[in-house]
Image (tube, helix red, strand yellow):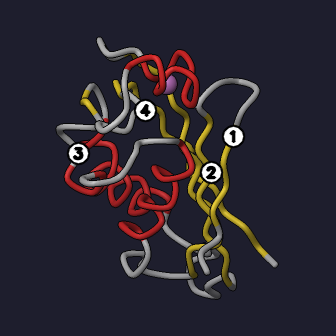
Amino acid sequence: MMLVTRRETFSAAHRLFKPELSDDENYSIFGKCSNPNWHGHNYTLEVVVSGEINKDTGFVIDLTKLKEIIRKNVISKVDHKNLNTETDFMKGIIPTSENIVMRIWKVLSGKIPSGKLYSVKLYETENNYFEYKGG
Ligand code: NI
C-alpha cells in the first residue's frame, strides 16, 4: 500500500469546558485547558492519502492539490482563530484534539481527488497526537 502524507501547521486558541459547570469543576476535568481566558496551541496536522500509483503521472495524488484542499478547507478556518467561537466546523462541540481531528476528517472526506483519505493525525504537543481513520 502506498501512503502519501501532507503536513501543515497552525496556531489556534481554545478552551475546554462545559458551560453548566463552575470554573473549579471544569478545571478538575480539563485541567489547564479550561482556563477561562483561553490559551493557544501550535498544532501540527498530517493528512495521509492511500492509493495506487497513477501510471501516467507516477503520483498517488498531486501534493500541490492536496495542500490547496487542506489550506482552503481547514487551515484558513483554524489558523490564528478561536476554535470555540470562530471555526464553523467546530460549532457545538468541545474542542479537544479528539474532536478536532474527527471534524477535520469529516471536512476532508469526499474532497480528495485521487486515492482515498487514510488517516488524519493532529499533534497538540510533541508528545501527544491523535489519529482518526474514519468509521
Ligand atoms: Ni489546550
Which numbered disc flags the more N-terminal residue, 1 or 2?
A: 2
Residue placed under numbered mark 1 in the picture: 129
The residue singled out by tag 4 in the image is 16
> Disc 3 or 2, which lies upstream in sequence?
3
The residue to which callout 3 is attached is 87
According to the picture, the residue beneath numbered tag 2 turns out to be 121
Circle 4: residue type: Leu
Q: Residues within 10 Å of mark 4 (few under 14, many from 20)?
A: many
Question: Do labels 4 and 2 touch, CB within 8 Å?
Answer: no
Q: Decide: marks 1, 2 in contact (CB < 8 A)?
A: yes
Across and down, in percent, residue 111 comes to 36, 76
Percent coordinates x, y for residue 75 in the rendering:
33, 43
Q: Nearer the viewer, residue 21 or 32?
A: 21
Q: Could you tell me which secondary element the residue under label 3 belongs to? A: loop
SS type, badge 4: loop
Helix, strand or loop for disc 2: strand
- Using the numbered discs, state the Cα–Cα distance from disc 3 to disc 4 in whole angstroms: 15 Å
Q: CA distance from mark 1 to mark 4?
A: 17 Å
Image quadrant holding the C terminus, namely bottom right
